[in-house]
Image: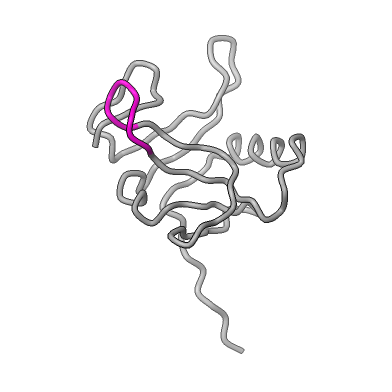
Amino acid sequence: MVTAPTKTAPISLTPRALAEVKNILVEKKVPTEYGLRIGVQGGGCSGMSYLLGFDKPKDNDETFELDGVTLVMDKKHAMYVLGMEVDFQDGLNARGFVFNNPQAKSTCGCGSSFSA
C-alpha cells in the first residue's frame, strides 16, 4: 500500500495558538470544509499585513494538516511566511494572535504588518 507523502507546513502554530484555533472552530461552528487560511496582503504601515481567517481551499491553494487543523495557503504567499510561528497571547495588555516571521525585514509597532 502506497501512502502519499505528508507535506510539511511552511509555518507552525504554538500549542496556545492551536488550542485557540480549535476553540474558535467549535464556538463559531465553522463548517468542516473550511480551513485556517494564513497569508499576506498589501497594506498596513509597513507594506504588507497578515491574513488569518477561515476559508474554503481554492484552486491556487496548498493545504497542510497541523494537529487536526487544516491550514490553507495561497502558493504565492509561502515565500513571505516560510518559517513563521503563530502564537496566541491572552494577557492583561494584549489578547490575540502574534506573528513571529523570520522573513520580515522590518515590522510596525503593532506587529500586524511587515516588509519583506
Which residue is more in the foreground, 6 or 108?
Answer: 108
Judged from this view, the residue extending furthest toward the bottom is 1
Magenta residues, dominant SS class: loop
Residue 108 drawn above or below residue 15: above
User: What is the x, y in percent for residue 46?
Assistant: 27, 25
Instruction: Say which quarter of the image contains residue 65.
Output: bottom right
Colour setup of the view: one colour
Number of numbered labels in the structure image: 0
Q: Give the position of the C terminus as an image quadrant.
A: top left
- Residue extending farthest to the front is 59
Q: Which portion, as a residue range, is magenta?
A: 41-48
Residue 115 lies left or right of residue 8; in this view the side is: left
**Residue placed at 25% from the left, 27% from the top?**
106
Image location of residue 89, percent across then percent down: 55, 24
Horizontal and vertical percent for residue 64?
Answer: 52, 58
Q: Is residue 42 magenta?
A: yes
Residue at point 57%, 46% (across, down): 36
57 magenta-colored: no
Query: In the displayed structure, does residue 56 sit left or right of residue 111?
Result: right
Q: Residue 103 versus residue 57: which sits nearer the camera?
A: 57
Residue 23, relative to residue 94: is it above or below? below
Q: Quadrant of the N terminus?
A: bottom right
Q: Position of residue 77 (x, y in %)?
A: 36, 49
Q: Is residue 68 above or below residue 18?
A: below
In percent of the image, x 57 and y 19: which residue is there?
95
